[in-house]
Amino acid sequence: MKAVTFQGVKDVKVKEVHDPKIEKPDDIIIRITSTAICGSDLHLIHGMVPNTPEDYIIGHEPMGIVEETGPDVTRVKKGDRVVIPFTMACGKCYYCEHHLESQCDNSNPHGDVGGFLGYSETFGGYAGGQAEFLRVPFANFTPFKVPEDAEMEDEKLLFLSDIIPTAYWGVESAGVKEGDRVIVLGCGPVGLLTQKFCWLRGAKRVIAVDYIQYRLEHAKRTNHVEIVDFTTHDNTGSHLKEMTQGGADVVIDCVGMDGKMSAWEMVETALKLQGGALGAINIAAQAVRKGGTIQLVGVYGMRYNAFPLGDLFARNITLKMGQAPVIHYMPELYERIKRGEFDPTDIITHRLPLEKAEYAYTVFDAKLDDCIKVVLKPGG
Ligand code: NAD
Ligand code: ZN
């Protein structure tokens, strides 16, 4: 089969690889019909996720049709349509039973963190979903089975695999409530969906921050938010604080690691700025009101450990973060899409055959061709 493979920093190739096989009695094999590229894949191709070997198959936002089932699989059958979450989870451990499937105890033999589809050996070593076929483990718990009467096209459902429940979880975890003033950092797919959910939870003001003009314009046009281009202010944090008369109740960081700066450049810039705005996390620390909440949805890694802890402590800030536990949100969010409460498709700018993945990564990474979200279609 064909699959998108990691070859090195900023180097992905569509290659011919072996088809996946049933390895455990509760595995299934699916034929992928649609699969998306995520901002998290950019961290991976920027070389920021350790232990990603050459030829590793990437991708964690797939859906498709069940082709084959292991002997212990009871929850889905051949021919079922399924959306596969990025979090691999057993459904039986303490974390799965307490709505924290992203920390499943049994999905990652390589460490005390959850296992994620197509996200390196560090996160379990599962071959990813930007491919024609995929092995899905824990098939009695992990996949979301699309109801048989659903007439919705793939595009309405595909992002249930990650960014819809991630954005929803971020807003819920941050405790956004009626009347809140919320700042959303980042107008990528995750930020744009987060803005929608802030309104649905009754926020009074939603301010979106980015520096890519077409993404800011998209946020304003589709989500009716106020927009701020952070490159037009010397100190974006204090500008946002002024805009919100003392700081926002909640700041949600939908940016995470910036792959464009080397670790050393970051240290140098931080020293130069002496605590000024460096990257989204520092903007968040400055723009939140005393006693407010910062929610990190954007992914961070170890090199961000130099962090403004003193400032946050002094101002009684609540800081929440993590890999979204997406599985238990999927049925509820499916119903909300079905009822038309929000439209997840307005972020899709590119629909391409799987073979065009190299081009797709280039435009999504460099923010070219007005790219926001890419959906790859194997076999199409
Ligand atoms: P993306 O790269 O398309 O979007 C990020 C946006 O942030 C870009 O538009 C970029 O211009 C903007 N940006 C960069 N620096 C900024 C700054 N200092 N302030 C404001 N905006 C800035 O990615 P995406 O697909 O939207 O994903 C966003 C983040 O969410 C990524 O870090 C991704 O890994 C993460 N993510 C986390 C989870 C989770 O479970 N926590 C799940 C999915 C994605
Ligand atoms: Zn993702």
Image (cartoon, grey):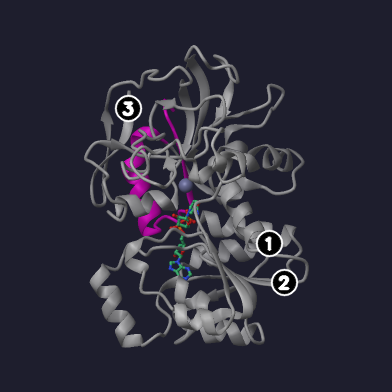
Q: Which mark is residue 198?
A: 1
**Residue 286's x, y, as percent?**
52, 81
In the image, residue 377 lies in the stretch drawn in magenta: yes
Residue 119 placement: quadrant: top left
Read off the residue under disc 2.
180
Q: Residue at x 62, y 66 (%)?
A: 220
Read off the residue under disc 3.
2
Looking at the picture, which amino acid does disc 3 mark?
Lys
Query: In what element is the residue under mark 2?
Result: loop
Q: Residue at x 55, y 85 (%)?
A: 239
For the C terminus, the image quarter is: top left
The Cα–Cα distance between marks 1 and 2, rounded to whole angstroms, is 9 Å
Which span is picked out in magenta? 353-380
Q: Nearer the viewer, mark 2 or mark 3?
A: 2
Would residue 159 be visible to someone looking at this image? no
The reply to whether callout 1 and callout 2 are in contact (CB within 8 Å) is: yes
Q: Is 362 placed left or right of 256 in the picture?
A: left
